[in-house]
Image (cartoon, rainbow, N blue to C red):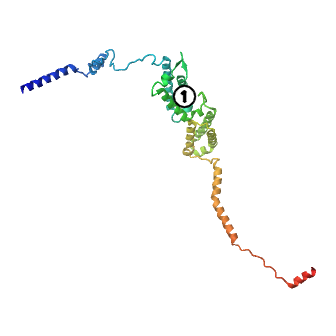
Amino acid sequence: MFIVQVGALLIALTYYANAQTSVVAVNTTIPGSEQSASGLRQLAAAVVPQSSVFHPSLRSQFSLNLLSAFPEDLEVSNYCVALLAIFGQRYSTYVNCLVSAARPVKVCQNCYGTYGNLMEIYKNISDQMGPGNVSCRDSLLRSDRLMLVFLLYSNLEDIWTASECNRCVSLRHHSLTNDTLYFMETLNQSLSCFEKYQKQGNHSELCTECKATYRGLNELYSRMEKNHTLCIDIEDSMNMTRILWSKDFNCSFPRAETVPVIAVSSFMLFLPIIFYLSSFLHSEQKKRKLIHPKRAKSNPSFINIQDKFS
């Protein structure tokens, strides 16, 4: 029994000695009220396990970062880095323009210049060659699975395409088209007329005086719709103008295409009446009996007279 107790005591002493040599005491409180560089080094040295394989450098704060530089053949050239910085600036400018032009929608007329600048720098990245025949296409657009630059540009390009801004902007994104400018001018005339008579509080006079300009605006919109020259800016502005005319001002006027519709509807309405009336008259004619004239009886004396003359 005594031998067993002595053996257990020796085993306990052995485990205690190993624990003291392998475990490092960690003080998680940073000395002083300020987190100085030396204090951060001490904290990092205490947290990192003491291993013969991993030895952190005391020159860095935590020494847990990856290598900051790769071989020169894997790094992006200075020319491509400069293009990437310009792309980021123009991307941010265009996004800010889109947000500010969200309501009312003016993404085409307000942001065509910033989109043109963004498209220009992206074309330089994807197609153009830099000094020393340096191409940034592979290093910036295809170097990883995410392809972030391509993805960012594609999202904004989808917004531009969905807005159909190419219908309202010139080919090189330098200005708005003449049709768009003329529509905006006609729209301003209608809105100015609305504002003039709205201040007077007489909506009936507004409906009468602004009828001509509003009709012209609708006719212009219909022509542009047929010619496929509408973008989201024109569509949204026309919808808002129609809401003002019909709901806010309670105005209306018969449109030109409603006249044939009314004529055809009236004809279809009276068609059953005409059908039943003609059927009734036709049936009445069948009910009538034809009266045949009686034939005169033959007289022998009359026959003899005819024979004498013959």
Residue 47 versus residue 139: which sits nearer the camera? 139
At horizontal 63% and vertical 55% (from top left) the residue drawn is: 265
Residue density around tag 1, few if under 14, some if 14–19, many if 20 or more, within 10 Å: many
Residue 120 on image: x %, y %: 55, 24
Residue 237 versus residue 265: which sits nearer the camera? 265
Residue 122 versus residue 28: which sits nearer the camera? 122
At horizontal 56% and vertical 29% (from top left) the residue drawn is: 112
Residue 301 sits in which quadrant?
A: bottom right
> What quarter of the picture does the C terminus occupy?
bottom right
Mark 1 belongs to which amino acid? Answer: Tyr
Residue 197 sits in which quadrant?
A: top right
At horizontal 63% and vertical 53% (from top left) the residue drawn is: 262
The correct choice, above or below, for 186 with respect to 175 in the image is below
* Residue under numbered circle 1: 115
Residue 43 on image: x %, y %: 28, 20
Indicate the secondary structure of the residue bearing disc 1. helix
Q: Is residue 110 left or right of residue 31?
A: right
Residue 273 on image: x %, y %: 64, 62
Residue 166 on image: x %, y %: 58, 32
At horizontal 54% and vertical 45% (from top left) the residue drawn is: 247
| Residue 286 visible in rendering | yes
| Residue 199 visible in rendering | no
Q: How many marks?
A: 1
The correct choice, above or below, for 266 with respect to 277 in the image is above
Which residue is outermost to the left? 2
> What quarter of the picture does the N terminus occupy?
top left
Which residue is outermost to the right? 309
Residue 99 versus residue 10: which sits nearer the camera? 10
